[in-house]
Image (cartoon, rainbow, N blue to C red):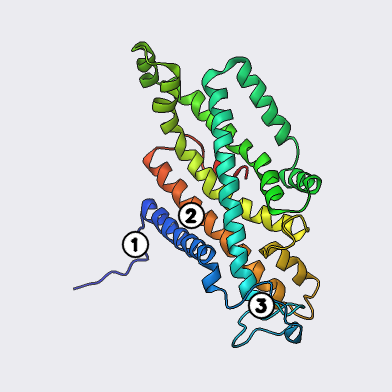
Amino acid sequence: MAFQLTNEKPKISRGAGYRRLLIAGGMVVAVLLLVALFAPWLAPSDPGAIHLESSLVAPGPGHWFGHDRLGRDILSQVIYGARVSMMVGIVVIGISFVLGMIVGGAAGFFGGILDEIFMRVVDVFLAFPGILLAIALAAVLGPSLKNLVIALSCLGWVGYARIIRGQFLSVRERGFVEAARALGIGRLRIGLRHILPHCLAPVLIQASFGMGGVILAESSLSFLGLGSPNTPSWGRVLSEGAELMRVAPHIAIFPGLAIMISVLSFNILGDGVQGLLMKKGDLFLQRGSGRNGA
């Protein structure tokens, strides 16, 4: 009996690969959300407690991430920083989602002069680099967590509005919408009951990718001192550690890793969601369009 050796590898379906991405990203995101939710119970100490005798202590037993120049526990600041990043991300995505749905849906559904006005406003926002405009807004409003959320929300809705408008323009010309019009169904009900549900898939993908972008933007603004000065955030801790990279690199390394892991996990989650929806034929946008915008 002869045996033949082949170099063929077992084939993995695209759907299985996307499900793995979805599970992997979802598990890390779930851990981050749990850490943010139970931060007061998980943190070994008060993140703002000052112990000058422990200044710049290196990582070790009892203080796994070390201490900063004021003797504050880095692990506690990273844990509480997850709460700040998740909260800012969820609030900004929520506000951007609602504003984008209203503006983009109205522009795509009614068209005409309303569409022209809304889309010209969107073009004005897109004419400027997003992060620079966010820095300018946060600087004008002043350093605080509320103003940081306002600055990011004022820019984040643009991407959602463009996607929703495109989806409304596509779906409103379909046969089932024409049939609903022929039956005398009101325009508002057609928009909410017949068109809107078919537009949610790309918005969900935008939100999953956008969450990572918001976390990165929040960390960047906090790094520049535009976040809340009294709230522990990954960007603020990273900013303090950047000045001491040669003396105490652990101060910058751990918040930097937290930012990287969180952004990467949300991007992986977005890839998984996008792939599965594309495979089912529920998405009208080309792959990668979800990465545009906050």
Distance from disc 2 to disc 3, alpha carbons, whole Å, reads 31 Å
Q: Earlier in the sequence, mark 1 or mark 2?
A: 1
Q: Is residue 128 above or below residue 185?
A: below
Could you tell me if residue 288 is visible in this image?
A: no
Task: Please name the amino acid that badge 3 sits on.
Answer: Asp
User: Is label 2 in a helix, a strand or a loop?
Assistant: helix
Residue at the spot x=72%, y=67% of the render? 238
Q: Earlier in the sequence, mark 2 or mark 3?
A: 3
Q: In this view, does 198 lie to the left or right of 140?
A: left
State yes or no: discs 3 and 1 in contact (Cβ < 8 Å). no
Could you tell me if residue 41 is visible in this image?
A: yes
Q: Position of residue 294 (x, y in %)?
A: 62, 45
Snapshot quadrant of residue 239: bottom right
Nearer the observer, 136 or 163: 136
User: Is label 3 in a helix, a strand or a loop?
Assistant: loop
User: Is label 1 in a helix, a strand or a loop?
Assistant: loop
Q: Earlier in the sequence, mark 3 or mark 1?
A: 1
Task: Please name the amino acid that badge 2 sits on.
Answer: Leu
Q: Mark 3 points at which residue?
A: 73
Question: Which numbered dot is residue 91?
Answer: none
